Amino acid sequence: MSRWFSTTPQGFHLCEWSYANLVHMGGQCGYRRCEATWNARGICVRWPLGLALAVESAVARMPLGWRRTLGHKLVPMVTLALVK
């Protein structure tokens, strides 16, 4: 469901969680560290968390059409791991 963007929630995907939201909530729940990993076509690279947050913020400010195109190319999948 996360593969498509729209201005309103569709299907079962009713809430869009940002990495910034998850990092904040993780801190409130006692997680001491967050790690971001960029994953695409079998390539897995650890990103500095600040870079993942900056890219997410930049993509969120783009017009919807650009988000659809660039969002999938820049950030096909970023995994966020919270560590206790």
Image (cartoon, helix red, strand yellow):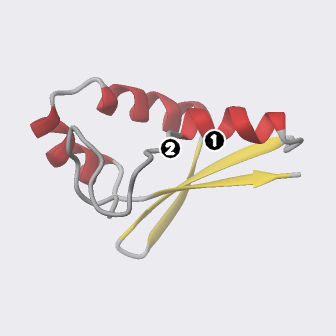
Q: Is residue 81 left or right of residue 42?
A: right
Residue nearer the viewer, 59 or 42? 59
Whole-Å distance between the Cαs marked 2 and 1?
A: 7 Å
* Above or below 66: residue 57: above
Q: How many marks?
A: 2
How packed is label 2: few (under 14 Cα within 10 Å), some, or many (20 or more)? few
Where residue 39 appears, as percent x and y from the top left, is 45, 63
Residue nearer the viewer, 4 or 48? 4
* Above or below 38: residue 54: above
Identify the residue at horizontal 53%, vertical 58% (top origin).
Answer: 45
Find numbered disc 2 in the image and state the secondary structure of the residue it sits on.
loop
Find numbered disc 1 in the image and state the secondary structure of the residue it sits on.
helix
Which mark, by number, is residue 56? none
* Above or below 3: residue 25: above
| Amino acid on which disc 2 is placed | Trp
Identify the residue at horizontal 86%, vertical 41% (top origin).
Answer: 32
Residue marked by disc 1: 22
Identify the residue at horizontal 40%, vertical 51% (top origin).
Answer: 14
Contact between marks 2 and 1 (CB within 8 A): the answer is yes
Q: Farthest residue to the bottom: give it.
A: 42
Residue nearer the viewer, 76 or 26? 26
Identify the residue at horizontal 41%, vertical 59% (top origin).
Answer: 77
| Amino acid on which disc 1 is placed | Leu
Residue marked by disc 2: 17
